[in-house]
Image: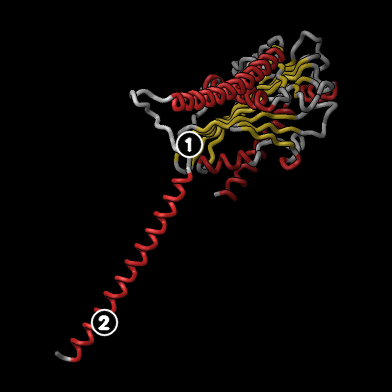
Amino acid sequence: MSTNDIGRREVLRRKQSEHRRKIKAERAALVREIDALQDLLRSLPPSSSAVSADGTLSWHTIADVFRSGSRQSMATLEKTQHEKHATDVMIFEMVRFVRACRPRPALALSSAFSVVPGNDTFVTLLSNGESRNKAKQWLTQQLYHNTDRAFGSFPTVFDPQEDFFHYTLRFNGSHVQGTEAFQIMYNAPLKTVLAAQQMKVHWKRPIVPPLPELDVEVAGNTTLFRDMTNRTDNYWNLLEGVFHEADRCVVVFRRIQDDETYKSKECFEHYALQWMDMRRVGITQTLVRYLSVRSIHHPPEAVLRSLRESSLDARPPCDQWVSTVMASDFVQNSSPERYQEACQAFDEEREQMHQVLATLT
C-alpha cells in the first residue's frame, strides 16, 4: 500500500470519527430537551377534552365560543354606535349648512353668459371639520357638474382656437353684476399650464393679496384661500375645486359669504362663480377657457362712484340699470376708457402667463 493511500484513509477515519461525535452530541441534547419538556408536562394540570365520552361538546368549549362571540359583538356594537354618532353629527351639521344657505332674488343679466344657477345663494361655512369639508365638496361639485352648461353659452362666432375676451358689467343703485369670459390657446402641455394656474398668475393684483400672505385651507381636491387681514369691508376669499379628466382639467371657484371660523358681518355681499377649462389640443398645445359671473349686493359708495365715472353716466335711479359691454370684436354702451382698460389688463395677464409658461417648459 502506498504512502498516499495510507494518508487518505487516515483523513477519512478522522472525518468519520468527528461526524459520529457530532451525531452523539446532538442526540444527547435532544434527549435532555425531551426530558425537560416531559417534566414541564407533568407539572401542568390535566386538560379536559373538548368532546365528552358520548361525543358531544363540553360545556367549557361552548362557554369559550359564547365568550368569544360576545366580545366580538360588543366590539361591533361599539364601532356601530360610534359611526352612528358621527353620522348623526354630520346630518345635523349639513342640515344646518343647508338652512344657512339663503337664496337671494335673482337679477338676470342681459348677457349670453346668464345661465349660471344659484349665483346669489348666501353660503356660510361651518366650523365643524368633517361637515366643513363635506360642504366644500358640495359647493365645488355643483359648479363642476354645470361646467358644460356654463361654457355652452360661449359665443359661436369665434374660431374654436382663436383668442378672445368678453366683459359685461351692469349696475344700478344697489347691485352690481358682471361677467368675464376669455379663451386663449397656449403653446404648452396641459400639465405645464396647470402648474402655472396653481401659481395663480391670473389673479389680479393688488385686489388679491400675494399668495404667501393668504390663509390656505386644503381638504381633498378643494382649497380655500382667505385674506385674514380685512374684517370690516371686503372679506376676500375664494374656494377652489380641481377636477382632473382624461384630456382636460376643470378648476372651479366660488366666493364664500360667511364663515363660522372668521366672522365677516360688516362686509358687503360679494358673489362669484368661476370656471376654468384647460383642455389638451395637442402634445404642446392647451386651450384655456374661462368664465366668471359676479354680483355685489349693496356695494360701497366708492365702488358705485368708480362705475359711474367709467361709464360716463349720471347716477341712475334704483330701478334703472347701466350697462357696459367690452369684447375683442364689439363694444356696446361702453366708454372707450373702460374698454381700453379691460383689454389692456387682459393683454397683460396673457403676456404674464406666457412668461411663466416659458420658465416652466
Q: CA distance from mark 2 to mark 1?
A: 81 Å
Furthest toward the left, the residue is: 1
Tell me the amino acid under the disc marked 2. Val
Secondary structure at badge 2 equals: helix
Q: Is residue 299 left or right of residue 341?
A: right
**Residue 95 place in picture, x, y as percent:** 66, 14
**Residue 335 place in picture, x, y as percent:** 73, 24
Q: Which residue is mark 2?
A: 11
Number of other residues with Cα within 10 Å of mark 1, as a class: few under 14, some 14 to 19, many 20 or more: many
**Residue 276 place in picture, x, y as percent:** 58, 30
Marks 2, 1: nearer the viewer: 2
Q: Is residue 332 visible?
A: yes
Secondary structure at badge 1 equals: strand
Q: Quadrant of residue 186?
A: top right
Q: Nearer the viewer, residue 316 or 252?
A: 252
Which quadrant: the N terminus? bottom left
Q: Nearer the viewer, residue 11 or 320?
A: 11
Q: Which residue is mark 1?
A: 280
**In this rendering, is residue 3 above or below 117?**
below
Tell me the amino acid under the disc marked 1. Arg
Which residue is painted at 64% across and 41% down in the image?
199
